[in-house]
Image (cartoon, coloured by chain):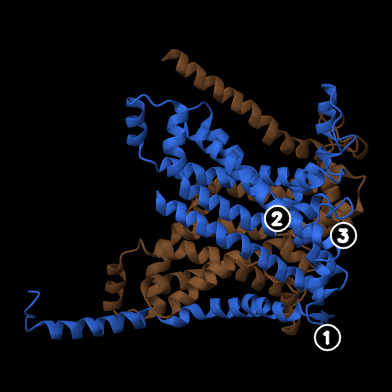
């Protein structure tokens, strides 16, 4: 019994050491390089900074090119909030109606969801549609794209969750004279809270981290998102690794903060959605 | 009761019909309209339009029908063919590695070991980090001369290769980083699958004197088949469509040795060859369909056999 426990502890310690090397060292490298001066950082070494320049780098990145990074953060925040709000609302409505009522709509929605999960979006034709609607290179256009691409996953989660809400609750509200909108809004939506949190967190991370969407549908410095500034930084200031990694660090923080607070919801969302998809 | 219908049945049926109608009107179909409109305009229309535009020489203002020329070019130019082959290699390699490593980690992280919570959290965190950020970080770590990885290898007297500059190695290196980043989801799905296996099976097997390996081979492996299927499908879809990590790390280089269809689409788009770019999209669609349909059918058959 004691040898068994000892062996488990040994495996655990070994795994922790490996995990530190494989997963924590790259992240520590980001933090350390972001704290170095430019010449120090250009050595690309995994070492403590000779002089800590964390704050200087932070100020420099934020003020770089009239604060393009700050503007990008605002853009990304607006993009994320609008996209996720619309996604949650629209997907909840679809998931709710198709779960509560069997109709010709169900096979249609099933096909849409499956296609949305598998078919790679056609890039240039989407640009063409956006141009026709005069939405190309606008934040609004990108919001609609993000919502569309995220709908499938959200509908799956909402439909699965609505199935756990007893119909008797609906019937009670209907007998009290609630119309469809009031029934959904005052009865169902509050009960959806757990799944809403999951969807919000998972999709917020996805939209915030999205690179391909802004690259194709929102080009130009005017309304750059954070992922694009990162990409541009890489091209423009090759010798300033400290600033590049400060930018990476800044961009990594919001998702990590979400993960720390909503760890359980993220994990639940990703495994649930996956197993049902 | 079954042969003689009691007099109330008809009435009750009618009543049921009206309540059904009443509840139906409480769940109006127009709730699905906004989502359907978005899906139609921004997904279905571009997808169907892509079949037409892939047959044209296209500048967004001007469309000229040229038949299958784009596809002929796609499979004649070595650069584009490389992208096609690389897509398959990349998709299969990353998917296979995620299944094997994810299952191993899943088994390991469901056994009672020290620091389990920490390990689960740390394996998952790369999933949340920006792909571009990961790409740039590893590009620097894998620098052929000054990179941390080759420096450490140097301590042991190993001359590290040019991970991203060697044409034979670049694609494999990016695939490895892809596995590093995506392993967390695979592991998570396997953990969920393994935890759902009833403990009685393992207990019974132990009573019969089954070794750890036998338990894994005859209980864990077959009963986590649904999880395996999910991981295979998810990682294949992601792997075949991948673009951003490759773009951040190699831009498809050196030369075009690590191009995939996703990066070919972007390069042709940038160069203004919209028809060719869209043909790339159609090819990608065909590849995804050609791989996913047999794989999901095979997986479903395996699951039914069990």
Q: Which chain is blue?
A: B
Mark 3, residue position: A66
Mark 1, residue position: B64
Q: How many marks?
A: 3
How many neighbours does mark 3 have within 10 angstroms: few (below 14), some (14-19), or many (20 or more)?
few
Residue shown at 61% from the left, 71% from the top: A148
- Could you tell me which secondary element the residue under label 2 belongs to? helix
B6 vs A246, nearest the viewer:
B6
Mark 1 vs 2: CB contact within 8 A: no
Q: Would you say A173 lies left or right of A161 here? A: left
Residue shown at 61% from the left, 44% from the top: B98
Mark 2, residue position: B88
- Vertical order, A203 against A173 (above or below): above
Structural distance between the alpha carbons of marks 3 and 1: 44 Å
Asked where in the image residue B80 lies, by quadrant, the reply is bottom right
Asked where in the image residue B286 lies, by quadrant, the reply is bottom right
Q: Is residue A221 visible?
A: no
Mark 3 vs 1: CB contact within 8 A: no
Residue shown at 72% from the left, 83% from the top: A133
Q: Nearer the viewer, mark 3 or mark 1?
A: 1
Q: Chain of mark 1?
A: B
- Could you tell me which secondary element the residue under label 3 belongs to? helix
- Vertical order, B158 against B61 (above or below): above
What is the x, y in percent for residue B214?
A: 44, 30
Of mark 1 and mark 2, the one earlier in the sequence is 1
Q: Is residue A229 visible?
A: yes
Chain A tint in image = brown
Q: Nearer the viewer, mark 3 or mark 2?
A: 2
What is the x, y in percent for residue A17?
A: 64, 26
């Amino acid at each position: 019994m004691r040898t068994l426990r000892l062996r488990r502890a040994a495996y655990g310690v070994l795994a922790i050491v490996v995990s530190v090397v494989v997963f924590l060292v790259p992240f520590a490298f980001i933090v350390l390089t972001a704290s170095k001066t430019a010449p120090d950082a250009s050595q690309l070494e995994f070492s403590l900074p000779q002089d800590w320049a964390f704050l200087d780098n932070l100020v420099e990145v934020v003020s770089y090119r009239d604060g393009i990074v700050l503007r990008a953060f605002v853009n990304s925040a607006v993009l994320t909030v609008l996209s996720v709000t619309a996604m949650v609302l629209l997907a909840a409505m679809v998931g709710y109606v198709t779960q509560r009522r069997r109709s010709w709509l169900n096979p249609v929605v099933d096909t849409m969801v499956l296609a949305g999960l598998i078919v790679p979006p056609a890039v240039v034709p989407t640009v063409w549609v956006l141009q026709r609607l005069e939405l190309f290179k606008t934040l609004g256009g990108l919001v609609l794209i993000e919502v569309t691409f995220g709908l499938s996953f959200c509908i799956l989660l909402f439909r699965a969750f609505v199935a756990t809400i007893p119909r008797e609750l609906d019937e009670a509200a209907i007998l009290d004279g609630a119309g469809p909108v009031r029934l959904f809004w005052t009865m169902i939506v509050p009960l959806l809270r757990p799944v809403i949190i999951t969807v919000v967190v998972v999709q917020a991370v996805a939209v915030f981290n999205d690179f391909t969407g802004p690259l194709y549908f929102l080009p130009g410095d005017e309304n750059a998102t954070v992922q694009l500034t990162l990409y541009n930084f890489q091209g423009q200031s090759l010798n300033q690794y400290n600033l590049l990694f400060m930018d990476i660090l800044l961009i990594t923080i919001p998702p990590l903060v979400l993960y720390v607070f909503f760890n359980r919801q993220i994990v639940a969302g990703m495994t649930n959605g996956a197993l049902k998809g | 009761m079954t042969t003689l219908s009691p007099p109330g049945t008809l009435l009750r049926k009618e009543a049921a019909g009206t309540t059904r109608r009443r509840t139906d009107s409480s769940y109006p179909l127009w709730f699905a309209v906004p989502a359907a409109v978005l899906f139609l305009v921004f997904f279905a229309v571009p997808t169907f339009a892509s079949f037409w535009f892939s047959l044209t020489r296209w500048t967004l203002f001007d469309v000229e029908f040229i038949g299958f020329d784009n596809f002929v070019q796609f499979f004649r130019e070595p650069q584009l063919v490389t992208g096609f082959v690389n897509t398959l290699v990349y998709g299969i390699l990353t998917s296979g590695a995620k299944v094997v490593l994810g299952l191993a980690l899943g088994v390991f992280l469901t056994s009672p070991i020290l620091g389990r919570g920490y390990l689960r959290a740390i394996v998952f965190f790369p999933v949340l980090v920006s792909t571009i950020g990961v790409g740039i970080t590893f590009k620097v770590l894998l620098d052929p001369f000054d990179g941390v990885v080759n420096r450490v290898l140097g301590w042991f007297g190993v001359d590290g290769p040019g991970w991203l500059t060697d044409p034979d190695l670049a694609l494999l290196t990016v695939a490895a980083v892809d596995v590093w980043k995506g392993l967390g989801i695979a592991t998570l799905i396997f953990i969920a699958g393994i935890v759902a296996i009833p403990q009685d099976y393992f207990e019974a097997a132990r009573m019969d004197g089954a070794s750890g390996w036998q338990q894994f081979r005859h209980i864990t492996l077959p009963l986590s088949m649904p999880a395996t299927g999910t991981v295979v499908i998810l990682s294949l879809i992601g792997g075949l469509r991948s673009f951003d990590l490759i773009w951040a790390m190699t831009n498809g280089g050196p030369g075009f040795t690590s191009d995939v269809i996703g990066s070919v689409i972007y390069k042709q788009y940038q160069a203004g060859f919209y028809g060719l770019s869209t043909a790339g999209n159609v090819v990608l669609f065909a590849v995804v369909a050609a791989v996913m349909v047999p794989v999901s059918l095979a997986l479903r058959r395996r699951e039914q056999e069990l």
